[in-house]
Image: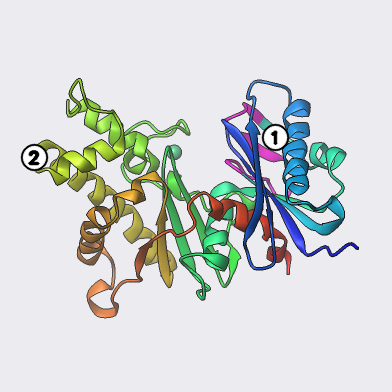
């Protein structure tokens, strides 16, 4: 019997293609992952995207007949006017007719969305922003991703090309960003940026792991250099978020990504700095700033339900 009550999700990254089957209660029933194999042809990679997704269906003991939808999150975006995937830096793709490739390999309705938007939507329907309709999510990882949810829907602006929170401008002609521009939020607030500043300041010694957690750990231990690095980091983040609050005034802000694992060591000073620098904070308070709940599953759960965006 075909129930069509399950959904298929795929999270595409430069390293792995991770698929999952999601049920009506937003639970992940099965997962499969294979290497992304960046550098291969679009045909090969998109065929593998379908392959790993079918593997997840099989693992759940289901068939494609049981699936109503295939949702895909990628570090890219599809121009809604041209239907082309604008860029996927992890694969070196530019303006790819992605849906043509995907439909060749999978007989399900499909939608591709920016992975950070998918994660924000996942947190909205099943995670830290449950019950809210207007939320912002910022992911502090290798890069800075972000998702804007307005009235329950992903907001991505004209042609679906907006919502690029990581590339909002903090400093004119500032630090070089991965996008080729300078001074973006990502160039100051990604884990990569924190590591870059820590290296530049000579924080890491021969025995220490050169990651973001190490900077937080040193700061906790009272290392003045690390404390200064974290203070600067939080200042940049507060500046970026306060602009977003002034523009969107979300009901809640969710912080995800590897850096969010620092917990209250990040959130306490962040809330404090937001109080100091945000428009209207003294009169109207601030939206709650909370840690994401679903981790990497947010992107999968959000992707699985992307078709709800059309309703
Ligand atoms: Zn940028």
Which residue lies at the image location 91% right of the left edge and 63% below the top edge? 1
Q: Judging from the image, what secondary structure is the residue with disc 1 in?
A: strand
Residue on which disc 2 sits: 224
Residue positioned 48% across, 68% down in the render: 129
Return the x and y of residue 220 as percentages of the image width and height.
Answer: 15, 46
Q: Is residue 81 above or below residue 134?
A: above
User: Which residues, given as a range, are shown in magenta?
Assistant: 74-93
Of 295 and 231, the residue lying toward us: 295
> Is residue 92 positioned above or below 99 on the image?
above
Within 10 Å of the Cα at label 2, are there few (<14), some (14-19), or many (20+) other Cα atoms?
few
List the residue tagged with mark 1: 95
Coloring scheme used: rainbow
Q: In the image, 136: left or right of 31?
A: left
> Residue 206: horizontal and vertical position, in percent?
20, 20
Pick the residue in front: 152 or 35: 35
Please indicate, yes or no, whether residue 173 appears anywhere in the rendered image. no
Q: Position of residue 27 (x, y in %)?
A: 62, 61
């Amino acid at each position: 019997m075909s129930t069509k009550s399950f959904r298929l999700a795929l999270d595409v990254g430069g390293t792995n293609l991770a698929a999952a089957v999601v049920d009506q209660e937003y639970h992940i029933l099965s997962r499969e992952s294979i290497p992304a194999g960046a550098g291969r042809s679009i045909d090969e990679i998109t065929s593998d995207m379908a392959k790993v997704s079918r593997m997840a269906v099989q693992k759940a003991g289901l068939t494609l007949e049981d699936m109503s939808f295939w949702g895909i999150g990628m570090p890219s975006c599809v121009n809604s006017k041209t239907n082309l995937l604008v860029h996927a830096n992890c694969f070196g793709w530019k303006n790819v007719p992605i849906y043509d490739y995907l439909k060749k390999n999978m007989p399900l309705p499909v939608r591709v969305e920016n992975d950070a938007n998918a994660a924000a939507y996942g947190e909205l329907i099943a995670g830290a922003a449950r019950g809210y309709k207007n939320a912002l999510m910022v992911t502090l990882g290798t890069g800075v991703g972000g998702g804007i949810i307005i009235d329950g829907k992903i907001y991505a602006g004209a042609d679906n090309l907006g919502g690029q929170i990581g590339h909002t401008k903090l400093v004119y002609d500032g630090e070089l960003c991965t996008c080729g521009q300078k001074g973006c939020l990502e160039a100051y607030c990604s884990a990569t940026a924190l590591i870059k500043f820590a290296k530049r300041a000579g924080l890491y010694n021969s025995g220490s792991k050169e990651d973001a957690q190490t900077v937080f750990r040193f700061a906790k231990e009272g290392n003045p250099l690390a404390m200064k690095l974290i203070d600067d980091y939080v200042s940049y983040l507060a500046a970026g978020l306060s602009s977003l609050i002034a523009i969107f005034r979300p009901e809640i802000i969710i912080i995800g990504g590897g850096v969010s694992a620092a917990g209250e060591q990040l959130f306490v000073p962040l809330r404090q700095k937001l109080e100091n620098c945000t428009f209207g904070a003294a009169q109207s308070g601030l939206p709650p700033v909370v840690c994401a709940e679903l981790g990497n599953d947010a992107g999968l759960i959000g992707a699985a339900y992307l078709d709800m965006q059309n309703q």
